Amino acid sequence: MPEARPQLIEEKMSSWITVCGLDDIEQEGARRFDHEGRTYAIFRSPDDEVFCTDGLCTHEAVHIADGLVMDYEVECPKHAGAFDYRTGAAKRLPPCVNLRTYPARVEEGSVLVAMPVSGA
């Protein structure tokens, strides 16, 4: 698989929005989030960190939040390709294009994600 650098959307061109409560996502779980016509996936790691990626598999545009989440990876529910949800890196074929990632954090029990500002 070609080595590709994951793409992190920069915080300076974004706006923090509240997505859900931390308790709304199980450890090693995912939640779909739609915002301004785009789909995202929010992940909760075993150590309660949160991560956000584009919500559709780069191989065939299937909702990645519906996949199996385990060992810091999410498996696409259609063809079993896998991504590291911390970095967006494609880890197992068929996908060979990384997912974009977005800054995420927990504040007072709520999950916040830095969404790109429209037109930025």
Image: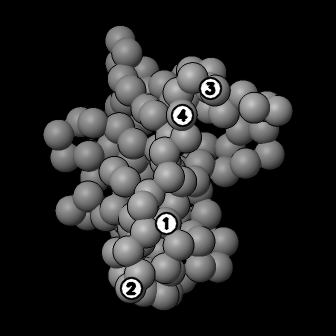
Residue at far top of view: 108
- Between 31 and 38, the residue placed more toward the observer is 38
* Residue at the image point whose x is 62% and y is 32% from the top: 115
Pointer 4: what residue? 10
* Residue at the image point whose x is 44% and y is 57% from the top: 6
Q: Position of residue 110 (x, y in %)?
A: 42, 21
Where residue 14 is drawn, which disc sits there?
3
Q: At label 1, which amino acid type do we have?
A: Asn
Counting residues from the start of the chain, the first of labels 2 and 4 encountered is: 2
In the rendered view, does 116 fall on the left or right side of 31? right
Check contact, mark 3 vs mark 4: CB within 8 A. Answer: yes
In the rendered view, does 48 fall on the left or right side of 87? left
Judge the density around disc 3: few (<14), some (14-19), many (≥20) Cα neighbours within 10 Å. some
Pointer 1: what residue? 98
Secondary structure under badge 3?
Answer: strand
Pointer 2: what residue? 1
Check contact, mark 2 vs mark 3: CB within 8 A. Answer: no
Q: At label 3, which amino acid type do we have?
A: Ser
Q: Decide: is 65 above or below 27.
A: below
